[in-house]
């Protein structure tokens, strides 16, 4: 038994133009620090001290040129040589610089990895939002099943529409959650959805599920009130779903 699909005549608001996935801007200071670390690898305290003196000389020379006043890489390289000099000065004699043993470097790499993961996730969400939008335009959205992460895609579609709720997308997710379609077959995904979807979507899903159990095979047009009630009065819709669950329990 499947939960009837909600009415298909709900109005859909046009989406805003698609936005390209964000790209991390070029950071001259970060480039400068990385260049210093590559050069310093294997250097002892004396070699780093010599490199620091060279960097200080370059900084003095650069200060005489107005066109280099806004340079970010030079000062960053100088500051990094100074940091490495202090690091090796505090280390046992004979220690050579190893970026893999540098806590500052490892913390930056971890932060970079986290940012890259965020960018990849943003690109995935954007691509999936494009896919769902294409299905909407073809009228085939109800023929697909949701995937893990589509809750975030719903938020992206809403953002593209200027914050307006996308009724057809919400109805699609509510129907899938009620009928346990797609990744909602997994109990863990259904539990997680409670913290990812809005109260109206959750109330709509709960109401659809109970109505389908009480009236198997009910026509979709007869359930138009479920979406309207869940949208305008989500708490009341949720209470009604709970009440219907109690009725079903007394019949068992």
Image (cartoon, rainbow, N blue to C red):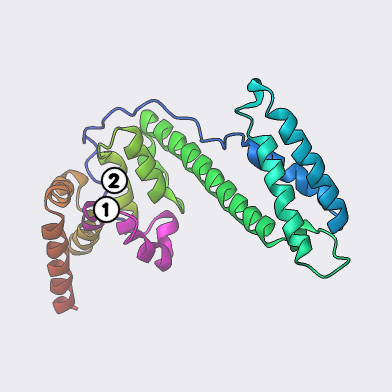
Q: Quadrant of residue 26?
A: top right
> Could one spot residue 43 in this view of the protein?
no
Residue 160 placement, left or right of 24: left
Please state which of residues 246 and 12 is positioned toward the viewer in this rendering. 12
Q: Quadrant of residue 165?
A: top left
Badge 2: few (under 14), some or many (20 or more) residues near its Cα, within 10 Å? many
Dots 2, 1 in contact, CB < 8 A = yes
Residue 128 placement, left or right of 159: right
The image shows residue 69 at horizontal and vertical percentages of: 62, 27
Secondary structure category for the residue under label 1: loop
Q: Quadrant of residue 86?
A: bottom right
Badge 1: few (under 14), some or many (20 or more) residues near its Cα, within 10 Å? some
Please state which of residues 22 and 10 is positioned toward the viewer in this rendering. 22
| Residue bounds of the magenta highlight | 177-203
Identify the disc placed on residue 170: 2
Residue at x 35%, y 27% (from the top left corner): 16
The image shows residue 110 at horizontal and vertical percentages of: 62, 56
Secondary structure category for the residue under label 2: helix
Instruction: Judge depth for marks 2 and 1 and give the one in front.
Output: 1
Please state which of residues 62 and 177 is positioned toward the viewer in this rendering. 62
Q: Is residue 219 on the magenta stretch?
A: no
Figure check: 244 above or below 220: below
Residue at x 29%, y 33% (from the top left corner): 162
> Could one spot residue 104 in this view of the protein?
yes
Residue at x 25%, y 40% (from the top left corner): 167
Residue 26 placement, left or right of 1: right
Q: Which residue is mark 1?
A: 198
Residue 167 placement, left or right of 148: left
The image shows residue 36 at horizontal and vertical percentages of: 77, 45
The image shows residue 214 at horizontal and vertical percentages of: 18, 64
Q: Earlier in the sequence, mark 2 or mark 1?
A: 2
Quarter placement of the C terminus: bottom left
């Amino acid at each position: 038994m499947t939960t009837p699909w909600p009415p298909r005549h709900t109005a859909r608001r046009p989406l805003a133009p698609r936005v390209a996935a964000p790209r991390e801007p070029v950071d001259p200071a970060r480039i400068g620090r990385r260049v210093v670390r590559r050069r310093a690898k294997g250097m002892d305290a004396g070699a780093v001290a010599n490199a620091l003196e060279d960097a200080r000389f370059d900084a003095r020379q650069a200060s005489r040129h107005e066109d280099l006043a806004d340079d970010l890489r030079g000062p960053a390289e100088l500051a990094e040589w100074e940091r490495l000099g202090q690091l090796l000065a505090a280390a046992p004699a004979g220690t050579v610089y190893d970026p893999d043993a540098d806590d500052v470097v490892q913390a930056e790499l971890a932060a970079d990895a986290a940012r890259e993961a965020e960018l990849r996730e943003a690109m995935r969400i954007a691509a999936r939002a494009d896919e769902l939008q294409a299905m909407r335009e073809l009228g085939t959205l109800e023929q697909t099943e949701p995937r893990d992460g589509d809750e975030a895609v719903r938020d992206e579609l809403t953002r593209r529409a200027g914050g307006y709720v996308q009724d057809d997308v919400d109805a699609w997710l509510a129907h899938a959650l009620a009928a346990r379609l797609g990744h909602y077959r997994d109990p863990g995904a259904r539990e997680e959805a409670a913290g990812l979807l809005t109260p109206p979507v959750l109330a709509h899903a709960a109401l659809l599920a109970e109505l389908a159990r009480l009236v198997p095979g009910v026509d979709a047009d007869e359930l138009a009130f479920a979406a309207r009630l869940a949208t305008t009065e989500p708490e009341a819709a949720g209470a009604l779903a709970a009440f219907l669950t109690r009725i079903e329990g007394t019949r068992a």
